[in-house]
Amino acid sequence: VSTASSVIAGPGPRSRSSRIPQWVALGVLVIFLAGAPSVVDSFTLSQILTKALWLGIAAASLIFLSSYGGMISLGQTGIFAVAGFTMANLVHAEGGKNLGWDPLAATAAGILVATAFGLMCGAIAARSYGIYFLMITLAISVIVFYFFAQVTTLSGYGGIRSVTPPPLIGNPVLNPLPLYYTSLVASIAVYTGIRYLARTPFGLALQGIRDDPARMQALGFNVALHRALAFGVGAFVASIAGILSVWYTTQVSPGGVNVAMTINILIIAVVGGLYRLEGAWIGALVFSLIDNYSRVWLPNVGDWLGPERFETVIGVIFLVIVLASPGGLVGIWESVWARRNRAMRGPAEGSGTVAEVVDEAVEPHAV
Amino acid sequence: MSSQFDLRIVPRLVLALAGAVVVAWIAYKGLQDGRIFWIVTLNGITLAALFFVVSAGFTLIFGLMRVVNMAHGSLYLLAGYIAFTIQTNNYGVSSNLLSGNPASFTSWIVPLVIATSVIGVVGVLMQQVFLRWNQGQDLRQALITIAISVILADQMVAHFGGIAESIQQPAAWPDSVQLFGVRYGFFRLVVVVGAALAIGALLFLVIKRTRFGMIIRAGVDDRAMVSALGVNIQLVFAGAFFIGALLAGLAGSLGGTMIAVQPGNDSAFLLDSLIVVIIGGMGSLGGAAIGSIALGLVNSYADVYLKFGTTDLTNYAILLTFVLVVAMLAVRPLGLFGRPA
């Protein structure tokens, strides 16, 4: 299935010259986002931008695994939940253990526990590929959901309310700014961190494994160990999103980490583009825009459509994207761009889009 | 990082030991109170019967077509709602005897047959419209079925509401039967287990003895070759998807009578099917049977026997399911009877 040329290629075969404008664009975007609070009202800031940022981090953990590791994981929600619930149990809150730890220490503990849990799940799932991996990680998420729903000393169906955020964040309802900037900084750190990791020997080996596990095994790489460690990295990223989500809503409940949430994170990743990291935040922005505004303008069409039918709308969008463009919105953008370039240069130079190249690589291999 | 050390013997030993401890604990509790043990075991077996009917369809579709139908749970739930609606609206059956009729055999079996067939057709439509032209791209097909399940789940809430309902069994049937000194629910024990056994036997015969089954077995091994031999593989695929969806529909109607029809059942039964086939191995009917029994028994034993003295750990029962999956994957990544894709 895989081709030799795609081994150790990044998530996209892009030339060096196109890399500089990309970083410039990113810088402009960051400056724009940093100035956003002075332009948009606090409702939009909190409900759209902040939410898109932490949802984007959650989706980025999935996209990291799919684009660099060839693993489409549905377990990110489970890890996200472990981080959030651990933190919420350790600090002052209504419900849960209410241990009264310092919020920052509790945050560190939450991330640590979730990453350790992720490494364990990675060790379990690392020997499975493709569809098997998808199913095993889905099972992990669902089991975490049932665990917190049933264990009443840690949460129960009602969840944990009034979770104390660190003083730095304050009350996100009264003043959404600190949480917005925290989420922005976290997003930038996650994005650059993953891009950096992809160029380290570990990241390159991981991409080699994505393209051809058997060959990497023959070259002496411990394939299962690399995959498990990558899952641990993904878990770390997901746990950051889990913590931010608890600060955002000041509560955490099993209802927020159910199968619907698992699917939502997958939808965000797929709509944005499973094979490009930027897609995570693009998908998350589209998702939170639809989430907010579909409740306002969606007309009633019998029982089929109406302000309550957000899931139907997002499901249809998801279906259309999966059917039309495996690379998501980023993939559509890139194929339009590639077609334009091809038209300018003449037909001879045309090559497959990124999504096509990687789509092939992500298909499971016979090992 | 370069050495590949083989530690596979360790998990096997640990597992064997843990298994022995668990069996000893259940035996100890069982000897203390044989009546409860027997009821709990029957709970597990009847649950396993329902799991088997659901997951047989799931595993059949995967085995032949490599399609993981993530909408399988949605088909299960949709069947329950269709059967419930027909029973209530067309026959006026209600659990409240003041406002409705008690169910007769006809007003139970007709909704079941209609719901099951409708789901079979829905399954074929889904396969023909969305999956057929994506053959071979199994992750994409999984994503497509996930999208369908999202839409179906939301539409079911819109049309049938969020309240748990249940399909009424025929009033003429007894409530319970006497078996080995305990009274146990007739529907669970006789109808559901009977249906599971009949379906298991029927599928076994169809797959081992008929031409269609022969083609399916050959297709599982080598699709391209079967196609090259002049078999209309598309027709076989559609047939397999029809049977798989049919089984989900039948299970939904049975489960709606045995337990309830409510939102959330779709993901619950999808998870159950996933666990069953992870344990048993994707595509294997025997694996589905063994996986169902393992999951059913673990669920019901954990609900009762996770009490040690005064410490009540029954809330943690779900973790045992996780342990079951982890244990199986540690020893056999492809499940008991699974084969590499």
Image: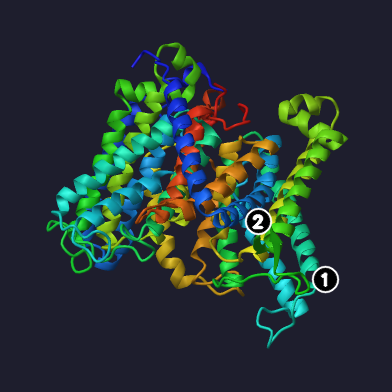
Give x and y (percent) for residue B318: 45, 50
> Which residue position is annotated with label 1?
B106
Mark 2 — on which chain does it sit? B
Q: Nearer the viewer, mark 2 or mark 1?
A: 1
Compared to residue A213, the image places residue A335 above or below, namely below
- Residue kind at label 1, given as amino acid type: Thr
In this rendering, would A150 be left or right of B236? left
- Residue shown at 20% from the left, 49% from the top: A107
- Residue kind at label 2, given as amino acid type: Leu
Mark 1 — on which chain does it sit? B
> Which residue position is annotated with label 2?
B75
Figure quadrant of the C terminus of chain B: top right
In this rendering, would A190 be left or right of B155? left
Q: Earlier in the sequence, mark 2 or mark 1?
A: 2
Figure quadrant of the N terminus of chain B: top left
Q: Nearer the viewer, residue B56 or A286?
A: B56
Q: Residues within 10 Å of mark 2 (few under 14, many from 20)?
A: many
